[in-house]
Amino acid sequence: MNQEVIRRLDALPGRVLCLLLTLHRRVADRLRPPPSDEPRRIVFIKLIEQGATVLATAAVRRAVERVGREGVYFCVFEENRAILDLLDLVPSENVLAVRSHSLVAFARDILSALSSLRRAGVDTAVDLEFMARASAILAYLSGARRRVGLHRYTAEAPYRGDLLTHRVQYNPFLHTAQAYASLLDALDGDPADEPLPKVVPAPIDADAPRFVPEADEVAKVRGLLEALAGYAIAGPVVVLNPNTGDLIPLRMWPAERFVELGRRVLSAFPEATVVITGIASEREGAEAVRRAIGSERAVCVAGLTTLRDVVVLYTLSDVLVASDSGPGHFASLTDIDAVVLFGPEAPQLFGPLGPRVHAHWAGLACSPCVSPYNHRSSPCTRNACMDAHSVDRVFETVAGCLAARRPLDALRRGGAP
C-alpha cells in the first residue's frame, strides 16, 4: 500500500471505527474501574517514519527505566523495523512488525500483533503518531487500560474518537522529541486534569544515541566503496541523498541541484569522493545523479546497502547532504556533519538532534505547510521552500564542514593534520 492508500484507509474506515469503538468504550468503562496500579508493560505505536523513531529515543528510554527493557514493546511497519534493530532500545522479540505491502498482509499482521500484546498483558499504550486514527485504534484494541496520545479537544483537527485515557493537546511549539517525552509525563497526570500534561517539558537532549559499528562492518562498507570507486579512498567523503522516492515529494530538493553540488565538491576538493545513497526503489534516480555528475570519483550505492550499512557509511564519511527525511536523523547517530534541507516542515519541530546538524530553512510565510492537523497533506504544488536552497549556500556549508574537519579526519585516517 502506498502513502495515499494508507491515508484514505485512515480517513474513511478509520473514522467509522473510531466512532464505533468510542461507543464501545463508553459502555465498557462503566463496567470496570480505571487502572490503579503502576504501568508494567508498555507498547509504543509508531508505524511510519524511521527518522521520527530516532526522535522518540528519549521517550522509549524513560519507559525502559520505568518498567525494564523486557517490559517495553514497539509496533511498527515492517519496512521501518530496521532502525529499531539498530538502536537496540527494546528486545528484538518485542518488536511487532506489520507488513504494509497489501491490505491482506496488513490485516493479518495487525491481528497477530494485537493477539501478542494481549497475551503479554500490556497495560499501557503510547501512541506516537500525530493525529492518525489507525494508531489510536490499535492502542484501544491492544487491551491496554492506559492509553496516551494526542487529542484534538476543541481544535478543528482530524476526528480520532475518544479512545485515549490520558489525552494530550498537540503543542506546535515543542520539538517532536519533547512532544514524545511529554506523552510519558502525561501518564503520571490525573486523566481528568485536561489537557495533559501540566508540567514544564524537559530540555531537548542535544545528543542522539551513539552508533559504534563493528570492525567487520566497517571493512565491508569500505570494501564496497573502494570496489565501486576503483581506488583506495583516503580523502574526504561527501554523501548525497537525493531521496527520489520520498513519501512527501514536497520535501525533495531538485536532482539537478544535487548534481551541481556534487560537481562543485569534486572541483573544490579533487581528492574527495562523492557517494550517492538511496533505497532500492531509488536506484534508477540515484544512478542518474551519479552519471550526471560525470566523475569517476562519484559512486552510487543506492539499493546495495541495508540501513545499518548506510549508518556505517556515515561513520566513514565527513558530510551528508539530504532533504528533511530519515537520513538526517540516522546521521545524528554518528559524528558526520549533516546538512539537512527543510521546506514544508520546520527544523524547530522535526530537526535531527546533535551538534553536527546544519539545518537550512528558508522560513517562507507558507512554511511549514504540513502538520498533524492536515494529515501532512499540503495543497502546495510548487515547493518554493525547497527551491530557495541555492547550491551556492549549501556548498558553502559543506566546504565549511570539510575545512573544520580536516585536522580530525587526518588523525582518524592515520595521516598528518
Image (cartoon, rainbow, N blue to C red):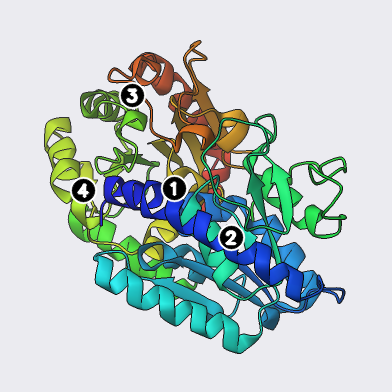
Quarter of the figure that contains the C terminus = top right
Give the alpha-carbon distance from disc 3 to disc 1, as whole Å: 28 Å
Question: Would you name the residue on which mark 2 appears?
Answer: 23
Is label 2 or label 4 in front?
Answer: 2
Residue pointed to by mark 3 = 268
Foreground residue among 245 and 102? 102
Are discs 1 and 4 less than 8 Å apart at CB?
A: no
The answer, for residue 196, to whether it is visible in the render is: yes
Task: Identify the residue at image location x=64%, y=65%.
Answer: 25
Residue at image mark 4: 282
Q: Residue at x 76, y 63 (%)?
A: 62
> Looking at the image, is mark 4 or mark 3 nearer the viewer?
4
Q: Secondary structure at mark 1?
A: helix
Judged from the image, the secondary structure of the residue bearing numbered disc 2 is helix
Pointer 3 or 1: first along the chain: 3
Instruction: Please name the amino acid that badge 2 sits on.
Output: Leu
Q: Which residue is mark 1?
A: 326
Query: Which residue lies at the image location 27% right of the left edge and 44% below the top edge?
Result: 276
Q: Image quadrant of residue 14?
A: bottom left
Name the image quarter holding residue 142.
Answer: bottom right
Count of residue discs: 4
- Badge 2 crowding class, 10 Å Cα cut-off, few under 14, some 14 to 19, many 20 or more, is some
Label 4 sits on a secondary structure element that is helix
What amino acid is at disc 3?
Ala
Camera-side residue of 262 and 241: 241
